Image (cartoon, helix red, strand yellow):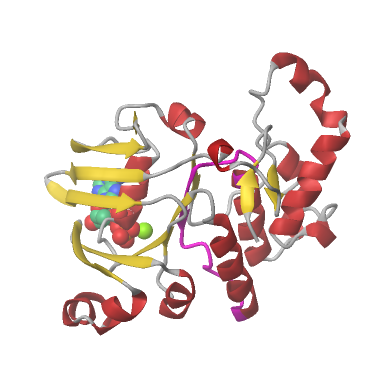
Amino acid sequence: MELMQGQQGVIFDGANVPAARRGHCELSIRNLSVSFDGFKAVDDLSLHIAQDELRVIIGPNGAGKTTLLDMICGKTRPMAGQIFLNDLNLTNLSDFNIVRAGVGRKFQNPSVYEDLSVAENLEISIPRGRGALASLFFRRTKVVKEEIRDMARIVFLDDLLDRRAGHLSHGQKQWLEIGMLLMQAPKLLLLDEPVAGMSPREREQTAELLKVLSVGRSVVVIEHDMDFVRSIAHTVTVLHQGRLLVEGSADEVQADPRVIDVYLGH
Ligand code: ADP
Ligand code: MG
């Protein structure tokens, strides 16, 4: 199944959209560094993530994984190096402009509006920048309702559109938050431990979801669960002490003595 971005940022699956209309996306991280009180949390790190790629980043606690995502989305300023999304230099943009450039970030704990329904959570995530006139009317349009229903189906919540988000399971909240991010049609999706708190069945479904999502965009996932990593990863990057330790397939990194030594052996 192909998932792509339509004219209004609507997500269609199986739609036949010309390749030129798809958001081309490549993330290029060049010699990135940041220190906290003299401690190098990320140290001269370079990474390249292609369009359609689903990259998993693993590494021991404190390796700098979350800090890396913080720098990509503008929450933490790098002290050296650069971050490019295609030709756009994100390095000194505000977090707001980084979102507008097409970067969606999911934090470790799901943040949804607990008092609103699934449908309402998705609705408020539709970007308002589709023209002032459009925004006056968009709540009532049939197109918006369809867009919400389509998204709920993609994230396995189509039977729960009217359920209050506070009454969803932890895993369903994670899916809802992914759906909310997708409403903004990001070119680059950053997910910090998206299967934390999920049942084995929910993990399997999430693996399928992430594979679909990586088509037409780049996806970066931080994850600990090696079975899950194995089920989704194209390439796995292992971070250690802010630096790139090993990069390769899940099998390659799992068999690598350096990775076993600093991470998997424990
Ligand atoms: P990971 O996500 O790989 O577990 P982090 O990126 O959260 O690691 O943290 C890397 C290191 O940077 C840790 O030693 C952490 O304590 C430190 N660190 C992260 N953010 C900050 C911050 N805002 N201020 C001070 N130290 C921080
Ligand atoms: Mg972390």
Residue at 64% x, 48% y: name it.
Answer: 112
Q: Position of residue 27 (x, y in %)?
A: 35, 45
Q: Position of residue 265 (x, y in %)?
A: 25, 84
Q: Which residues are magenta?
A: 182-200
Residue at 11% x, 45% y: name it.
Answer: 38
Residue at 33% x, 67% y: name it.
Answer: 236
Residue at 76% x, 15% y: name it.
Answer: 133
Q: Nearer the viewer, residue 103 or 78?
A: 103
Quarter of the picture holding the C terminus: bottom left
The image shows residue 195, relative to residue 99, as above or below, that is: below
Q: Nearer the viewer, residue 53 or 138?
A: 53
Q: Quadrant of ligand 2?
A: bottom left
Check residue 192 for magenta coloring. Answer: yes
**Can the viewer see residue 72 in this picture?**
yes
Q: Is residue 250 left or right of residue 231?
A: left
Check residue 223 for magenta coloring. Answer: no
Please identify the quarter of the rendering in which residue 57 is found. Answer: bottom left
Quarter of the picture holding the N terminus: bottom right
**Can the viewer see residue 67 in this picture?**
no
User: Seen from this angle, which residue lies furthest top?
Assistant: 133
Q: Nearer the viewer, residue 151 or 115?
A: 151
Please identify the quarter of the rendering in which residue 58 is found. Answer: bottom left
The image shows residue 138, relative to residue 121, as above or below, that is: above
The number of callouts visible is 0
The image shows residue 127, relative to residue 132, as above or below, that is: below
Please identify the quarter of the rendering in which residue 93 is found. Answer: top left
Q: Position of residue 135 (x, y in %)?
A: 75, 22
